[in-house]
Image (cartoon, rainbow, N blue to C red):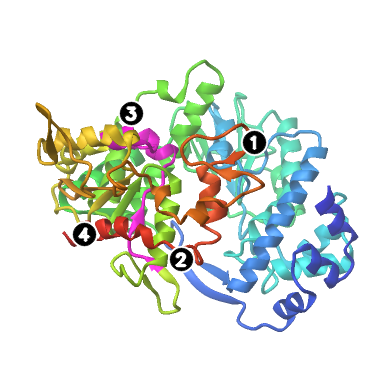
Amino acid sequence: MPRLRALQKATTLHDLAVILNYSPTALAYLLYKKTGKYSRFQIPKKNGTPREILAPCDELKSLQRKLKKLLDECLESIEKKRSPLGSLSHGFKANHSIITNAEPHRKRLYVFNVDIKGFFDSIHMGRIRGFFISNKDFNLNTKTATILAQIICHDDKLPQGSPASPVASNLIGHLIDIRMVQLAKRLGCTYSRYADDITFSTNKSEFPPEIAYRLENSHDWIPGGALLKVIYKSGFGLNHEKTRMQYARAQQTVTGLVVNQSTNTPAEFRRKVRAMTHKLFMDGEYYVHEENGPRSPKKTELNHSKLNKLEGMYSYIYMTDCFNRKKIIENSNRRHEDFPLSSLEKLHGDFLFYKNFYASPAPTIICEGKTDNIYLTCAIKSLHEKFPRLAKPDASGKVKLKVRFINYSELTHRVMGLNGGSSDLGHLIRRYAKQCGSYKAHPPLNPTIIVVDNDSGSQPIFQAIKDVTGDRYSIPSGKGKIFDKSQTLYKVAQNLYVVLTPLLNGKDSMMEDFFPPAVLRATYNGKSFEAVSPGPKGTTYSKHQFSQHVVKPNQKIINFSRFSHILKSINLAIRD
């Protein structure tokens, strides 16, 4: 455990600065002299009451992120030594989520929830400092513990908005987790915690009164003595307004997910998403219902330029569905591809098409893979003065793109059939016009531009263009006609364009051909670059490595002038 051992050996600010990769002077200034380290603002909670956020300045945020990474590494080392207890806390941890928190409570007769009152505010600087000193796994020097607490805390509490606050809350919360799981095990219950949300569940015919009991002649439940003792002994209190017992005969939810059978999003939530999406496609706007205080729902109208809310709702559903699919796959011979798309997943794909292609706030560029995205991004920034429609410096002089790139992911593969490659793009070209017909509120807002190599690998794209446009881009060849590859810009349908890399002396070309020869000859880890076919094993490096380790780091000195032909075609599509 080198990082943890280094932290345990630290006795001065200088020692800690070295571990965090800071100069002692810079660390001391940031901690003790810099003013205006936090800015305050409020966001509404679900019930409409304000939640105060304390956002650290950029310099302090960078320091807190480094400390968070250090503490995460220390915790990972510590947990490897411990006997496994299973996951108790699921908030703010890698590979944990509201789903892993809800999953242990499926198919239970009773599900009981309590909420810790003022969770972050209850964790003050003294508790953080004392933990680092007295905890047997950390056992830090008092000076080091004090400095760490000063980095983490503000106004003698954990600031909501700091990158270090979540991991610090889990350090302090671990004590309550250990005590709670012992209580749950003794009484035949299952326990989990997500931040300030505590859940117990059981299939016992009677719920243990030590944890909670029902008031006589009432359906109200209150926490039992044993539970309250653990809460208060751990230095916390409860928000009794959020205490609730849920029975198997009604809908049971844990951290917002239904747990009666499989862990899932509520049916009402999914119906709401469908209705919002339908209205968006028909009217170009949708409504969001939010709580604005007790019994006072607020209805907010959002248009096609504000899709993040609806996208987040879809991501929430998709995350839950992925979790359930993965469980089945791990316990069977089925693959992801064996699961047909649900109707809601198809609608999710329609929504992403609308967001990225039909109602995109800027021209959208689609390439065959992520390396081409990097090439074009670097070229556009380098040549921004020549192509101001593609990029422009902001007030600080930093060049900002005025176009968007599609990044492929498991999500785009699953619900849109887009994972890169010419076959996927050919399929997109064929269905593009029909898909656009699903949206009635307004015409397409900005062009969608597919940029691909002009070689045999793009044959599925050439054929798709021909299938959609007929003979518009065909030339005579013998007794028949062939696709004309000599053009560089093709208008296909609606707002869809295809840009090909220009032929070189009448021969096929690919994106890498437009780099200077010296760049293509660059070595990486003693290996040479081969764009088409790799040489003997261990002698060449990949396109991905070329883009990440040659092009990206050297973009300010690489001559991208030969990319002007490609950017000119993109520019023409935007002007059309």
454 or 406: nearer the viewer: 454
Amino acid under disc 3 = Ser
Task: Report how far apart the C-alphas of labels 4 and 3 lie in the structure.
Answer: 39 Å
288 or 180: nearer the viewer: 288
Residue sitting at x 56%, y 70% = 55
Which label's residue is closer to the chain start, 3 or 2?
A: 2
In the rendered structure, find residue 572 and report the number of the disc placed on it: 4
Task: Report how far apart the C-alphas of labels 3 and 2 lie in the structure.
Answer: 35 Å
Q: Which residue is mark 2?
A: 43
Q: Which residue is mark 3?
A: 342
* SS at badge 3: loop
* Quarter of the figure with residue 305: bottom left
Which label's residue is closer to the chain start, 4 or 1?
A: 1
Compared with residue 342, is residue 549 higher up or lower down, i.e. above or below? below
| Image coords of residue 45 (percent x, y) | 46, 60
Say which quadrant the C terminus sits in. Answer: bottom left
Q: Nearer the viewer, mark 3 or mark 2?
A: 3
Task: Report how far apart the C-alphas of labels 1 and 3 lie in the structure.
Answer: 44 Å
- Residue stretch rendered in magenta on the structure: 400-426
Amino acid under disc 1 = Gly
Residue sitting at x 70%, y 48% = 228
Q: Which residue is mark 1?
A: 538
